[in-house]
Amino acid sequence: MPQMSPMNWIILFSFFSFLSTTCFSKIS
C-alpha cells in the first residue's frame, strides 16, 4: 500500500471540508 503524500492529504481535507460546508448550508 503506497504511502499518501502531503498533497493527497490536503486534497482529502479540502474535499471533506467542502462536503461538510455544503451539508451545513443545506441544513441551515
Image: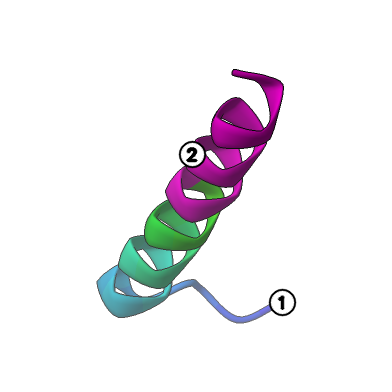
Q: Which residues are magenta?
A: 17-28
Q: Residue at x 49, y 39 (%)?
A: 21
Image position, residue 19 (x, y; %): 60, 49
Q: Residue at x 29, y 77 (%)?
A: 7
Tag 1: amino acid: Met
Which of disc 2 and disc 1 is earlier in sequence?
1
- Secondary structure under the numbered disc 2 in the rendered image: helix
Depth-wise, is mark 1 or mark 2 nearer the camera?
A: 2
Residue 1, quarter of picture: bottom right
Image position, residue 18 (x, y; %): 48, 53
Q: Is residue 20 magenta?
A: yes
Q: Residue furthest top?
A: 28
Examine the rendered structure and indicate whether residue 23 appears above or below residue 2: above
CA gap between label 1 and label 2 equals 31 Å
Residue pointed to by mark 1: 1
Image position, residue 17 (x, y; %): 44, 45
Q: Is residue 22 magenta?
A: yes
Nearer the observer, 10 or 25: 25
Residue 18 located left or right of residue 5: right
Q: Residues within 10 Å of mark 2 (few under 14, many from 20)?
A: few
